[in-house]
Amino acid sequence: MNHEPPRAGDGSREPNPHIPHIVIVGGGFGGLWATRALASAGVRITLIDRRNHHLFQPLLYQVATAGLSAPDIAAPLRHILRSQRNVEVRLGEVTGLDPAAREVRLGDGERIGYDYLLLASGASHAYFGHDDWADDAPGLKNLDDALHIRRRLLLAFERAEAADDEAERAAWLSFAVVGGGPTGVELAGTLAEIARKTLRREFRRIDPAQAKVRLIEAGPRVLSSFPEELSEKARAQLQKLGVEVVTGTPVSAIDERGYTLGEAFVPARTVVWAAGVAASKLGALLDAPRDRAGRIQVQPDLSVPGHPRIFVAGDLASVQQDGKPVPGVAPAAKQMGAHVARAIRARLAGQSAPAFRYKDYGNLATIGRMAAVVDVHGFKLSGVLAWWFWLAAHVFFLIGFRNRVIVLVNWAWAYWSYQRHARIILGDDESPP
C-alpha cells in the first residue's frame, strides 16, 4: 500500500491519514512562529506567502526614513526554514477558500488541500472610507511601502531645492504624518531629525531645518495605548525635536496639493498615513463573524466559528481578553502563532485545544535620537534610558545574527555621525504633482 502523502497542489481531497497536512497562509510573525513550533510534529506544512521574506515590521519605519536598508530587517523565508524538513515554502497569493473541500486556491488557479489551515495574512491600510486618499497619503505595511515613502521624503527636499517659487518651496518642505500611534510618532520624530541633522549643509538653495513636520492625531493624545503621563512626555519630546503635534482634529481631505485640517487647507506635498489598519481581505472569503476592521472573531482556541479546522492568528484575528481587545502588535501575533501550533498538536492527539491567553510584556515607542517611552508592567521610562531599552529589545528580537550585527553597526554610525546610509532614491524620476 502506498502511503506517500499527496503533493500540495495536486488537487487531492483526501489528506494522507499518516501525515496530516497543515497549510499556513502568511510568513509574518504569526505564521512563522506557528511553523517553527510545529518543527518536531509529525505533520507536513505548506507555508504560503505572496512575498518571499519575513519582515521585522517594528523597524519598517527605519527603512522608510533611510536609516536601514531593506535586507537589514528582512530575511528570505526559505533561508529561515532551510533546516526544517517538514516545511515547503510556496510563493503565491491565496485568492479563495473552500472549507467544505478543505482547499485553498491560489491566484494561478492551483488548489492546495489541507487537514488544518492557519490564516495569518496580516493587515492593510484603513482610510476610513476615503480609499481615494491612498495615492496621496501612502501607508506603511511592507517593504514596497517603505521604499515608496523613502523616495517621496527624499524627493521632497530635491524638489524644494529646485523650486523658484517660495510658496511651492514651502509646500515641498511641509510634511504631515496622520496618526499618532507608535508608527506615526516614530516617523514624525525621525523625519524631523533628518531635516535638522542629517541633511545639514547638503543643500545650497534651501535650509532643510526649515522643514515643517506635523503629526496629526484625531484623538485627544498621541500614543493612546500608553499611560497618559508617557503620552505627554512623548508629546514634549516630539516638540523638542521640532515636530508640531496636533490632536483632537481629524484630517477631512487629502489630495496631491495638501490636506484639509478642520476647515483650513494646508499646502503640503508629502503626507504619510499611519492612522489605521484593516484586516487582510482574506477574512472576507470565510463565512464567519467579523468586527468593524474586518478581523475574524475567533473562538477561545483561535479557531473560526463553524470551521474547527481553520485557525486565525495575528492582525486578522479579533480576540477579546478581560473585556479588552488583544492589540495588533508583534508579540501578540507570535503568541497566537505558537498557540495555534499547540492547538493543532492537541487536536491531532485527540484532545481539546486550550484557550489562548495573551501575555502583555509592555509597550515601547521611540521618538528620535535618545528619546523613547517604555511601559512594562507599570514600570515607566522615558528619555535616554527608555531609548536604550527600546534599542536592546528590537535588536534582540530581530531574525538572524547577521541582521542584528548590521543593525547595531548602522545605528552606532548614525548615533555618532547623524548620517543615514540608505539615502538612495530608487526608481524613475517623477515629475511634481
Image (cartoon, rainbow, N blue to C red):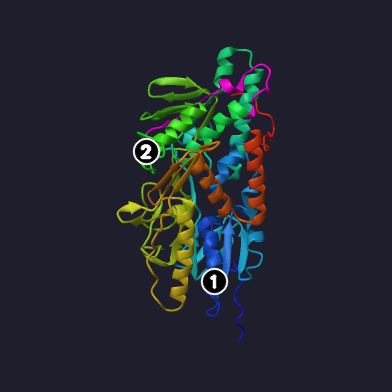
Range of magenta residues: 198-218
Residue at the spot of label 2: 229
Residue projecting furthest to the bottom: 1
Label 1: how many residues lie within 10 Å, few (<14), some (14-19) or many (20+)? Answer: many
Residue at the spot of label 1: 21
Percent position of residue 82, x then y: 66, 64
Residue 137 appears in view = no
Point 44% across, 63% down: residue: 311
Point 40% across, 71% down: residue: 353
Q: Up-down: is 23 above or below 28?
A: below
Residue projecting furthest to the front: 385
In the rendered structure, find residue 262 and report the number of the disc placed on it: none
Instruction: State left or right for residue 24 relative to residue 298.
Output: right
The kind of residue tagged 2 is Glu
The kind of residue tagged 1 is His
Q: Up-down: is 189 above or below 329?
A: above
- Mark 2 lies on a secondary structure that is helix
Task: Decide whether residue 207 is among the magenta residues.
Answer: yes
Residue 61 versus residue 27: which sits nearer the camera?
61
